[in-house]
Image (spheres, helix red, strand yellow):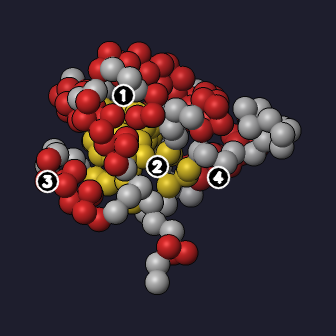
Amino acid sequence: MKKLGFGLMRLPLINADNYSQIEQNEFNRMADQFIARGFTYFDTAYPYHNGYSEVAFRKAVVERYPRDKYTITDKLPTWMLTKESDMEPIFEEQLKRCGVEYFDYYWIHTLGVTNYEIATKCHAFAFLQRLKKEGRVKHIGFSYHDKADLLDRILTEHPETEYVQLQINYLDWD
């Protein structure tokens, strides 16, 4: 796999004042060029473009390319969870929006102190493990937005984690 992913957080817009109105034709051209150059990895999430990023991905890629031409990442929005039963409907909605039967990568989104407490209370790690066992996701992990000591704790408590995406901002470094 080439080492460049296509993030679907800031897609071209029809109207700069409406984050939900993606310029689909322009995005299709961008996705076509990305795939034509041998790249496969697309990254979306539930809130990107108010949910329309997932739909735009389906239109640009899923409806126009065979499944072996792309990989897709999506994320469980921890801030939307209040109880364990919240996760399945969100996941099903994401599959439908993206138009896929499984995600290549599925992760718990934006872990930090508060969201880790939510994920723990709702058994989000067990949920991801079940999805993987069922074949509805291929790889599981999380994105991380906090200090090193909590990251170490999470990785110790959840050795099933296959990958972590770190939010790193060079402006935060001395």
134 or 156, which lies in front? 156
Of the image marks 3 and 4, the number of the one nearer the N terminus: 4
10 Å crowding of disc 3: few (<14), some (14-19), many (20+) = few
* Residue designated by label 1: 102
* Residue designated by label 4: 33
In the rendered image, residue 96, in percent from the top left (x then y), is placed at 49, 19
User: Whole-Å distance between the Cαs marked 2 and 3?
Assistant: 28 Å
Q: What is the total number of numbered labels drawn onto the structure image? A: 4
Q: Amino acid at mark 1?
A: Tyr
User: Whole-Å distance between the Cαs marked 4 and 1?
Assistant: 24 Å
156 or 60, which lies in front? 156
Of the image marks 2 and 4, the number of the one nearer the N terminus: 4
10 Å crowding of disc 4: few (<14), some (14-19), many (20+) = few
Which mark is nearer the camera, 4 or 1?
A: 1
User: Whole-Å distance between the Cαs marked 3 and 4?
Assistant: 40 Å
- Quick one: which residue is furthest to the bottom in this view? 174
10 Å crowding of disc 2: few (<14), some (14-19), many (20+) = many
User: Whole-Å distance between the Cαs marked 1 and 3?
Assistant: 27 Å
Which mark is nearer the camera, 2 or 3?
A: 3
Of the image marks 1 and 3, the number of the one nearer the N terminus: 1
Quadrant hosting residue 120: top left
Q: Which mark is residue 156?
A: 3
Identify whether 7 is placed above or below 59: below
Q: Are marks 2 and 4 in contact (CB under 8 Å)?
A: no
Quadrant hosting residue 141: top left
* Residue designated by label 2: 41
Q: Residue at x 78, y 41 (%)?
A: 13
60 or 160, which lies in front? 160
Q: Residue at x 43, y 21 (%)?
A: 90
Q: Amino acid at mark 3?
A: Thr
